[in-house]
Amino acid sequence: MILSKRSFTWADIVVRRWLVRHPSFLVKVVESRGVVSDDSLWETARLWSVVPDWPCIGIPLAGHGVLRAARSSTEMRRGYIGLVGRGGDFRARTERAPAFGVFVQWDPAVFGSASIASLDRTPATPRELARIASALREITRENAPYETLAAAVAELFRVFASLGLVRAHAAVDLCAPSPRLVAVGHAIDGALSRTGTRPMLVDLTRALDCSERQARYLVREYLGAYALQGATEWRTLAGVWTTYLAGLLMTAPAATTEGVAGVLGYGSPSALCHALTNAGLPSPGEMRRIVADLA
């Protein structure tokens, strides 16, 4: 089980993401302020982190948004749990107001297949929400020991079992990853969380005190365990994250192409536009239009 933590702040904009990855599940905790996150922006590039054939649930604890699947949609806010039967159909939108919540997926072969239609929404009791919030505080706690992380994840799945979403006693090994994988993950997240400069492989060589060749090997090893977003090397991993941030930042009310290019370390606005085009993403102006039309 690997924990990845990335954060980005710029002016009054905040983007934070904690991702717990296990061969049988993933837990993604997200916090945002000042930007709109809408998966419709990423339709062609598929930049959001989902396993296509696993069920997916979304639980907002602050803020509001929309959960979509196929042609259906439902509004989401605190007090509800949104459920999508298949991750490949999952789409979500979170508005600019401060937001905090969690998305969870699991392998049906291990945890069972919940009776979820294409899209559903169910109310959560105050006690269930309190248990979920307590677990998320532990997952996002700075420098929490691995045992604390494992206990928090186990508590989340106990709540889901009480709701009838997963098997109550699924046998899952929550053993800690190797120290080497942990160190590589910290170095990657540190490089990707640095504001104002493009993340480079040399950042990893310095953090890990190794050669570029060894850094590439370690990144491939880490991504093999991480198993998300189709990234198999540093270049694609860094490109996915920076273009994802670019899309988010362009939804801020006062954002300009020049400003976003500068804060993400692109040499010019045209370089940013070129990177978005190469990633299969809309132009900055088109991003604003899509976000406005889907509001």
Image: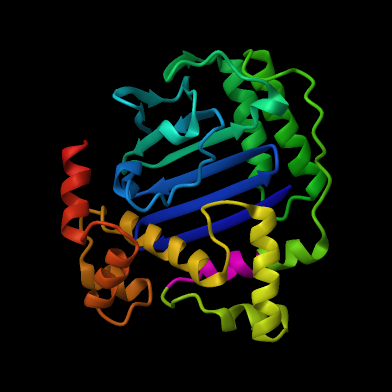
Frontmost residue, 49 versus 208: 49
| Residue found at x 49% / y 28% | 86
Give the mark count. Answer: 0
Q: Position of residue 280 (x, y in %)?
A: 31, 59
| Residue found at x 56% / y 32% | 54
Q: Position of residue 259 (x, y in %)?
A: 26, 71
Would you identify the image quadrant in which residue 257 lies?
A: bottom left
Residue 255 belongs to magenta span? no
Would you identify the image quadrant in which residue 276 lies?
A: bottom left
* Magenta stretch: dominant secondary structure: helix
Give the vertical position of 180 relative to 285 (above or below).
Answer: below
Frontmost residue, 144 versus 65: 65
Q: Position of residue 148 (x, y in %)?
A: 78, 42
Give the vertical position of 43 relative to 75 (above or below).
Answer: below
| Residue found at x 58% / y 84% | 202
| Horizontal side, residue 234 vs residue 22: left or right | left
Task: Name the image quarter holding the C terminus.
Answer: top left
| Residue found at x 51% / y 59% | 7
Frontmost residue, 208 versus 233: 233
Q: Give the range drawn in magenta.
A: 186-195
Residue 190 belongs to magenta span? yes
The answer to whether residue 289 is visible is yes
